[in-house]
Amino acid sequence: MSALGLKIIDESAEAANVWFNEVNERTGWEHKHRAYRLLRQVLHVVRDHLNPDEAAQLGAQLPTLIRGIYYEGWDPSRTPVRERSREGFIARVQEAFETDPLGDAPQAIAAVMAVLDAHVSEGEMDDVKTAFSQEIRALF
């Protein structure tokens, strides 16, 4: 018997926790809520930069619960946002941490991108990365 009565929900929560734990591990944090906020914000900044087709292709490879976080609040008619600078990308990620600054934001962003690299196909990640300028790709 599953904890919540639906195996798909239990498996989705388990998969999401794997991702949050990996973000914690890669950042050196021990704060699952902070890891969730970081993952959510980086996913949103990446998603908003991609054209709708590419955003959907990335979303299709995410676990169910992470996919819901990824699509939360998305308005495809307002994308893609073209951020070309490293500082602008970091600033958009930092918006979720106004009262709790990231500290080493580039390292935190790289941690999330490493989690994506570990779970999303290489071809899809190549497509995602090439959508960004060289300056921003250096963060990944």
Image (tube, grey):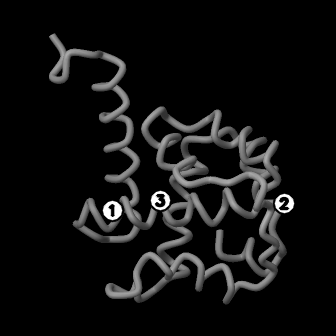
- Residue at the location (66% across, 79% down)? 89
Dot 3: within a 10 Å radius of its alpha carbon, few (fewer than 14), some, or many (20 or more) residues?
some
Above or below, 100 against 59 in this view is: below
Label 1 or label 3, whichever comes before in sequence order: 1
Image marks 1 and 2: residues in contact by CB distance under 8 Å: no
Q: Is 15 on the left or on the right of 60, as rendered?
A: left
Name the element at disc 2: helix
Residue wearing tag 3: 40
| Three-letter code, disc 3 | Arg
Label 2 or label 3, whichever comes before in sequence order: 3
46 or 139: nearer the viewer: 46
Depth check, mark 2 against mark 3: the one in front is: 3
Image marks 2 and 3: residues in contact by CB distance under 8 Å: no
Residue wearing tag 1: 24
Q: Position of residue 84 (x, y in %)?
A: 81, 80
Q: Position of residue 131 (x, y in %)?
A: 83, 61
Name the element at disc 1: helix
Dot 1: within a 10 Å radius of its alpha carbon, few (fewer than 14), some, or many (20 or more) residues?
many
Q: Position of residue 26 (x, y in %)?
A: 40, 64
- Residue at the location (55% across, 81% down)? 106
Name the element at disc 3: helix
117 or 69: nearer the viewer: 69
| Three-letter code, disc 1 | Asn
Q: In the rendering, which numbered label is found on residue 130?
A: 2
Depth check, mark 1 against mark 3: the one in front is: 3
| Three-letter code, disc 2 | Thr
Quadrant that contains the C terminus: bottom right
